[in-house]
Image: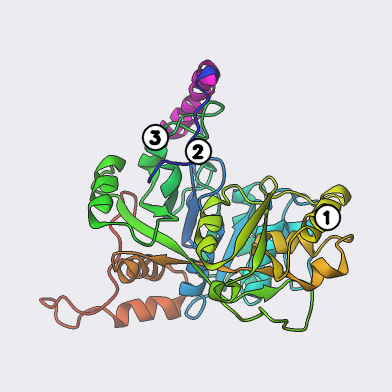
Amino acid sequence: MEGDFIKVNEWLAPLSWFYGMGVSLRNMLFDTGVLKSRAYDVPVISVGNITVGGTGKTPHVEYLVRLLRTQMHVAVLSRGYKRKSSGFLLADKNTPMRDIGDEPYQMKQKFPDVEVAVDKKRTRGIELLTAGESGGKIDVVLLDDAFQHRYVKPGINILLVDYHRLIIYDRLLPAGRLREPLKGKDRADIVIVTKCPRDLKPMEFRVITKAMGLYPYQQLFFTMLDYEELKPVFTKEKGPLAGGTTDSLKGMNVMLLTGIASPRQLMEDITPHIRSVKPLTFSDHHNFTGKDLERINKAFDTLEEPRCIVTTEKDAARLKDTEGLSDDVRRNIYALPVRIRFMQDQEETFNQNIIGYVRKNSRNSILAKRKDDNKPKNGNSAGNGPRTISFRNN
């Protein structure tokens, strides 16, 4: 059920009060204009959350990339959490994971035609991305994990909320995992409840919709996780499981190796397909040490045949940057790519909102012409052009 992953440490509530006062003061300074938020002449879409990790930001950013990249020149700007470099860095196909972080590296490898950059200062990152001759071609900037980065004023602010950790039941840090008070959700133009069970009942949709207490200017969507074909992490040979779905794990003893904030949903999704599962979990964005690799080797040795290791794409990106895994592990470890799917037939509505906003606000004359071409010729006709979302500031 929703909220079932939440754990609140009541004894830390006094510290949460002081933390909340500090965050609320910062937000008030932005709301009153003492601290300035900057808007840009290029469409900017922010994807983020108000909890600490685990809401599925990367799959949702990748969904936006797939939606837009065939029609527009897309750029993704991330902080590059735990990277070994500093300042602004524009990635190319040879940029190592350690220089940009696991999530930006994953996106650049998947979408080499998309500009992927990292910069802790998002305002500077946008300026450098959109400057010069090449920057002038960028039609839209996607900000990864920037809901609290209020120095940028995005055209669309997307807030992700984990179904199993609904923010309405959570508490502020350090008692809970909220980065800011619940009121922060009011800044969102779109709210997406992520990682929903596939069998969510219509009544549950209605209950969550009412409980979220959104304003009329906000739209609510629901998504679930879909899993793609298994991919070998190290070997170029396909192996017995490569290209298979989770169904191909039937009868296998699986070690689920994760270094993500919320692996429980993944474990619940693959458990029905396998003989047994042995979870081996690390913290989010964990940098694997020699001791960790030895622990992985030993844990895999204890599994009975038939056996394999399943990990996430994000973890695979970090594992590729290590040395110390046994040959047996390297031959039998597979990444399980994840995509998101909209529920309740909401996909088309969401897509039209995003594409309509980008076209309406694009600097690119070709996109502007497409927008004009989609306008109804007769002023009394509704036409078939993309619907634009009606935001407060757009």
Image height of 311 relative to 236, above or below: above
Q: Amino acid at mark 2?
A: Lys
- For the stretch drawn in magenta, the main secondary structure is helix
The residue at 66%/55% (across/down) is 278
Find residue 357 and report its horizontal and vertical position in percent.
Answer: 37, 65
Magenta range is 12-33
Q: Earlier in the sequence, mark 1 or mark 3?
A: 3
Find residue 47 and report its horizontal and vertical position in percent.
Answer: 49, 54
Front residue of this view, candidates 93 and 292: 292
Q: What is the tally of numbered marks visible in this picture?
A: 3
Find residue 238 and report its horizontal and vertical position in percent.
Answer: 72, 83
Give yes or no for residue 139 being in the magenta stretch. Answer: no
Q: Earlier in the sequence, mark 2 or mark 1?
A: 2
The residue at 23%/50% (across/down) is 206
The residue at 55%/70% (across/down) is 74
Task: Determine the image quadrant of residue 298.
Answer: bottom right
Alpha-carbon span between mark 1 and mark 3: 39 Å
Q: Earlier in the sequence, mark 2 or mark 3?
A: 2
Image height of 284 relative to 106, above or below: above
Q: For the residues labelled 1 and 3, say whether their Cβ atoms are less than 8 Å apart.
A: no
Q: Amino acid at mark 1?
A: Lys
Q: Which residue is mark 1?
A: 298
Q: Which residue is mark 2?
A: 36
260 displayed left or right of 11: right
**Res 18 seen here:** no
Q: Which residue is mark 3?
A: 169
Front residue of this view, candidates 86 and 239: 239
**Res 251 seen here:** yes
Q: Which of labels 1 and 3 is toward the front?
A: 1
